[in-house]
Image (tube, grey):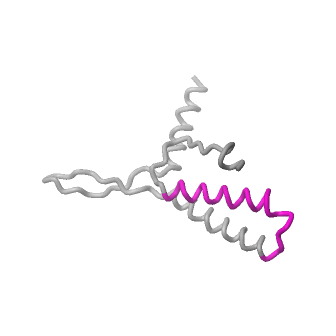
Amino acid sequence: EFIRKCAKFRTVVKMEDDELVSQIHHLFRVTYLRDNVLRPTMDESSLSTLVSLAQFTQSDIIKGVITAPKVKVAGAGGVASELPGLSYLTKVVRLLAVEIDAIRT
């Protein structure tokens, strides 16, 4: 109930990758359940399984954040090609650079 009513997902940059956003939500739910709901009643084996699940999900999220998505670009003669776009990490770093520059001036 807490997750549904109180927790809000907010991003610094818009995330168009629905699968990545879904993995972030999944990781949050697993971590919340592990740390708050199930911890008192869990045995070592179950705890280890949830920790492993969280680690694999974190790895997938990191790959998704640092990997640049392909962007379709219309080429000559109407032929579309795919070029690498900006990764979410690059977008965040650029946004931070703008904010730091604004603070300094």
Say which quarter of the image contains residue 33: bottom right
Of residues 49 and 4, the one drawn nearer to the viewer in this rendering: 4
In percent of width and height, residue 45 lies at 79, 77
Q: Nearer the viewer, residue 105 or 64?
A: 64
| Quarter of the figure with the C terminus | top right
Foreground pick, 28 / 52 = 28
Residue lying farthest to the front in this orientation: 1
Percent coordinates x, y for residue 3 in the rendering: 68, 49
Extent of the magenta region: 19-45
How many discs mark residues in the rendered view?
Answer: 0
At a point 52% along the width and 57% down the height, the residue shown is: 20
> Is 39 above or below relative to 6?
below
Q: Residue at x 61, y 59 (%)?
A: 26
Outermost residue, right side: 40
Vertical comparison of 58 with 76: above or below: below
Lateral position of residue 83 relative to residue 46, left or right: left
At which x and y percent is residue 9?
Answer: 60, 45
Check the image and report above or below for 27 versus 8. Answer: below
Spot the residue most to the left. Answer: 77
Q: Is residue 50 left or right of residue 11?
A: right
For the point 34% across and 53% down, which residue is it? 71
The question of residue 40 being in magenta is answered with: yes
Depth order, front residue of 87/46: 46
> For the point 48% across and 43% down, which residue is it?
14
Magenta segment, prevailing SS (helix, strand or loop): helix
Residue 76: x %, y % from top left = 16, 52
Residue furthest top as drawn: 105
